[in-house]
Image (tube, rainbow, N blue to C red):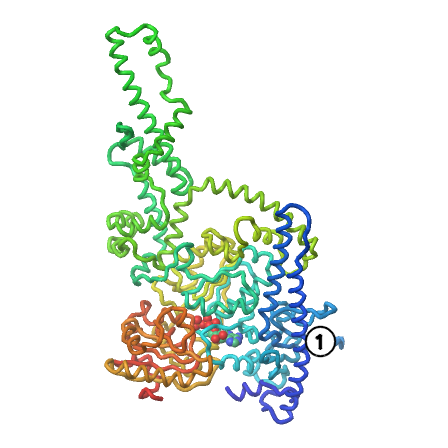
């Protein structure tokens, strides 16, 4: 591949002929080009500095004092200041690699000049308000990403600018001359030289943006419209994650009015992965994005524990919808006989049938459990109040009736007793007061709570998991057999697992919140918000800020409420279970269970989603076997699929091993084509179990020597669960597991599950046979482990090497 890469990397002045190697004349031309580009880049940075200075001055000076109420003055100051601060933050975020590309268009048919466009991380205008730098997301930047030799459009030349700080250190050109290219070269990568240089860099433990080298197929993903469900299916290393994150930035730029208020949610597989990707969006100047794992989608619970596969399968299936419903109904009870409650020395009684009627009446209300409960409580209190009144009446009436029978009663009392015998014992006011009094009696409350408790999702599930009888009762209604029910049993206080979170969310929907007071407050707040929004709009007009990118009066007003410090969209969304987002991106989406999809879909009723994953990598037994299985029921109009077919991460020699694994474990799937062809051949090292402690340490040190260069270079030891303890003991200095330190340390010990989505310069896979045996889906985990390597792969085995790895060259461990 080397020759073709070099051929496409054209020296600036060499004729546009692929295959021609750069020569001395080309080097001179390159130096001249670097000098010329430096001039432009310096100008762009100078302009950036001016804009920053202006933004700083504007921020410091504020919009002036403005008249009106105290509230209006506060809005005027803080709204405008915050928008200026945002603008300044954006300008500051683009320092590194401000300008990275240039496109020279062909003159048009009428002989007009084609023009030159510079592409950067942000759009800048010169002092005459003429465009200087085009934001990479703007339509005018698109040809930079889409022109290929086979279909160059109007692009005559694409140039990549390589900067160190503010200095241009090199340029790479692609000159599009179709006649000189054969079919193979016509499908060349976009900006191949720049791309390969980017791919060869050592890993840092954090994903970086790839804004300068986005490939055409990725560009299609990134710029696909906002509406509907886009599925991005691609093998390992095809840039699904990186494209999805750039898509988030693109959507926020292009549809800012829709998305800034509702925000964008990115769901990733685990906390380490989120840390791995967390710098990409701020690097692109975006902050209105919430990053979360499925285990973090229920505010107040941060689940990281993972259930055993057989438990995850039960909890992940759609039968859990009926299960949660049955669990809630199971807490709406009728006493075996009559309800009896001691109160004030009396035993108050509500008959069994009346209790049943109260329960059925409450259930018939189309509302969640905690709201229905209000009706149940009222009915029960009323029944108790009447019983008490009747008992009182009996207490006073009986002696009187006795006296009447015996003729001892004066006539006027006798007449009174015979008057209105049907009159209710309690009028409306008396009834209300009696109910209130009863509600304050702990015994009454306890008795009603026993029948129809107010429940949180946590309490519902925790109580249920701890009660085998209840599990079987509830499970039977949802079609679970006893063995499945028993799998769910666990002691109270056990940590929440990732598979519990969708069940908590489901329970929250069924239980609801009895929030009458809250809703009244919300209505009042809404009226106030409308007024604030009106005012904020006026402020923006007065301050002449309406043209500033992304300003929205409603949003600004919302950010500056009286109650507490202003919250960003991301902060407000993350704390609110019922928040609905403008767009949701799910990465490693193949791992989500059917129940997890229900939770995700609730967060995006508009069904504007990007679903990113690889069915061939599904590790979770509750995960997807096909996209249709998970998505069809939510999107009646269908979803669109885009495939990514090129692997940018894993060198070809390692990919051939991965292909063998895939052919053995999922023959219906195809591995992506590797774009890199560098690095040494992958090897297998036989290490008897007893020698693991000293051999593994030496192996890791040798590999680190190969890959670590300054701050760059990372290694992972990916092991079976069975050998994890032995591996940890052999590598006491390497952090293990999905921890923050893991990403920052040169070497880390991970399981396949934890390694998902990550990549390392060198990977040592320990115990492939164990990984295969443990893999619930039959081997996908080994495919995942192998494809984490960007340069070097070593497989350490103590028994026979699984036949699917026979392509690995045997080595003695010190290669
Ligand atoms: N256009 C590009 N320019 C530079 N680097 C790229 C490009 N596309 C992908 N890469 C790099 O390739 C590597 C793999 O990308 P990414 O992690 O997004 O792949 P993925 O499809 O999500 O992989 P997996 O399914 O294995 O998790 C990353 O280092 C990414 O930065």
Residue shown at 59% from the left, 73% from the top: 95
Residue shown at 29% from the left, 84% from the top: 695
Quarter of the image where one finds residue 272: bottom left
Give the camera-side residue of 806 and 453.
Answer: 453
Rendering coords of residue 462 (x, y %): 31, 51
- Residue at which label 1 appears: 115
Quarter of the image where one finds residue 484: bottom left
Local secondary structure at mark 1: loop
The answer to whether 535 appears left or right of 643 in the picture is right
Q: Could one spot residue 156 in this view of the protein?
A: yes
The answer to whether 380 appears left or right of 186 in the picture is left
Rendering coords of residue 372 (x, y %): 39, 39
Rendering coords of residue 4 (x, y %): 54, 86
Tell me if the residue at label 1 has its CB under 8 Å from ligand 1. Answer: no
Q: Is residue 587 above or below residue 150?
A: above
| Residue lying at the far bottom of the rendered structure | 24
Q: Could one spot residue 639 in this view of the protein?
A: no
Q: Is residue 712 above or below residue 232?
A: below
Image quadrant where one finds the C terminus: bottom left
Quarter of the image where one finds residue 309: bottom left
Rendering coords of residue 623 (x, y %): 37, 63
Give the camera-side residue of 503 and 629.
Answer: 503
Give the camera-side residue of 259 and 551.
Answer: 551
Residue shown at 56% from the left, 70% from the top: 219
The answer to whether 366 appears left or right of 152 in the picture is left
């Amino acid at each position: 591949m080397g020759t073709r890469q070099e051929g496409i990397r054209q020296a600036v002045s060499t004729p546009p002929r692929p295959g021609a190697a750069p020569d001395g004349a080309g080097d001179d031309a390159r130096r001249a080009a670097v000098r010329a580009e430096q001039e432009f880049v310096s100008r762009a940075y100078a302009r950036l500095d001016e804009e920053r200075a202006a933004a700083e001055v504007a921020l410091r000076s504020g919009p002036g004092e403005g008249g009106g109420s105290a509230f209006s003055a506060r809005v005027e100051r803080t709204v405008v200041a915050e928008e200026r601060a945002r603008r300044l933050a954006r300008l500051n975020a683009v320092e590194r690699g401000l300008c990275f590309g240039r496109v020279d268009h062909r003159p048009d048919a009428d002989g007009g000049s084609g023009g030159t466009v510079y592409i950067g991380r942000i759009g800048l205008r010169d002092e005459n308000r003429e465009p200087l730098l085009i934001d990479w997301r703007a339509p005018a930047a698109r040809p930079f990403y889409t022109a290929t030799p086979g279909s160059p459009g109007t692009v005559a030349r694409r140039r990549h600018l390589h900067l160190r700080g503010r200095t241009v250190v090199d340029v790479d050109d692609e000159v599009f001359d179709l006649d000189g290219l054969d079919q193979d070269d016509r499908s060349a990568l976009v900006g191949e030289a720049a791309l390969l240089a980017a791919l060869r860099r050592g890993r840092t433990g954090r994903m970086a943006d790839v804004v300068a080298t986005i490939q055409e197929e990725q560009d299609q993903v990134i710029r696909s419209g906002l509406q509907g469900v886009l599925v991005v299916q691609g093998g390992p290393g095809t840039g699904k994650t990186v494209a999805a994150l750039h898509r988030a930035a693109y959507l926020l730029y292009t549809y800012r009015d829709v998305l800034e208020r509702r925000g964008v949610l990115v769901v990733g597989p685990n906390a380490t992965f989120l840390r791995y990707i967390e710098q990409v969006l701020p690097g692109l100047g975006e902050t209105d994005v919430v990053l979360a794992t499925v285990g973090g989608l229920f505010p107040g619970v941060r689940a990281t524990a993972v259930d055993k596969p057989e438990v995850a399968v039960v909890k992940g299936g759609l039968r859990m919808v009926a299960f949660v419903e049955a669990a809630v109904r199971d807490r709406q009870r009728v006493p075996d006989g009559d309800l009896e409650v001691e109160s004030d020395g009396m035993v108050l009684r509500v008959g069994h049938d009346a209790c049943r009627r109260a329960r059925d009446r409450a259930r018939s209300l189309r509302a969640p459990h905690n709201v229905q409960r209000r009706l149940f409580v009222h009915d029960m209190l009323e029944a108790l109040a009447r019983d008490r009144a009747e008992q009182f009446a009996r207490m006073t009436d009986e002696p009187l009736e006795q006296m009447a029978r015996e003729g001892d009663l004066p006539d006027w009392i006798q007449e009174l007793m015979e008057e209105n015998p049907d009159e209710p014992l309690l009028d409306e006011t008396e009834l209300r007061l009696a109910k209130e009094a009863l509600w304050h009696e702990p015994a009454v409350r306890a008795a009603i709570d026993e029948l129809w408790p107010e429940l949180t999702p946590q309490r519902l599930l925790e109580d249920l998991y701890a009660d085998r009888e209840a599990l079987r009762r509830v499970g039977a209604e949802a079609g679970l057999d006893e063995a499945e029910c028993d799998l769910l049993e666990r002691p109270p206080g056990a940590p929440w697992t990732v598979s519990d979170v969708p069940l908590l969310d489901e329970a929250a929907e069924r239980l609801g919140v009895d929030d009458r007071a809250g809703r009244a407050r919300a209505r009042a707040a809404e009226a106030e918000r409308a007024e604030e929004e009106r005012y904020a709009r006026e402020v923006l007009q007065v301050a002449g800020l309406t043209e500033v990118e992304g300003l929205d009066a409603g949003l600004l007003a919302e950010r500056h409420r009286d109650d507490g410090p202003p919250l960003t969209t991301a902060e407000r969304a993350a704390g609110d279970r019922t928040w609905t987002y403008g767009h949701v991106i799910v990465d490693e989406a193949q791992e989500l269970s059917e129940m997890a999809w229900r939770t995700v879909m609730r967060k995006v009723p508009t069904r504007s989603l990007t679903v990113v994953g690889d069915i061939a990598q599904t590790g979770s037994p509750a995960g997807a076997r096909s996209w249709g299985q998970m998505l069809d029921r939510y999107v009646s109009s269908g979803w669109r699929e885009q495939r990514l077919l090129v692997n940018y991460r894993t060198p070809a020699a390692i990919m051939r091993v991965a292909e063998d694994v895939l052919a053995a474990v999922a023959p219906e799937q195809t591995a992506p084509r590797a774009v890199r062809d560098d690095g040494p051949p992958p090897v297998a090292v036989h290490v008897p179990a007893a020698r693991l402690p000293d051999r593994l340490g030496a192996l890791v040190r040798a590999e680190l020597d190969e890959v670590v260069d300054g701050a760059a270079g990372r290694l992972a030891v990916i092991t079976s669960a069975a050998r994890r303890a032995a591996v940890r003991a052999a590598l006491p200095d390497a952090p293990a597991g999905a921890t923050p330190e893991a990403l920052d340390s040169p070497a880390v010990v991970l399981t396949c599950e934890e390694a998902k989505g990550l990549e390392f310069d060198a990977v040592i896979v320990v115990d492939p046979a164990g990984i295969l045996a443990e893999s619930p889906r039959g081997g996908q985990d080994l495919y995942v482990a192998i494809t984490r390597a960007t340069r070097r792969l070593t497989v350490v085995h103590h028994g026979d090497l699984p036949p699917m790895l026979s392509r690995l060259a045997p080595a003695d461990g010190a290669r």
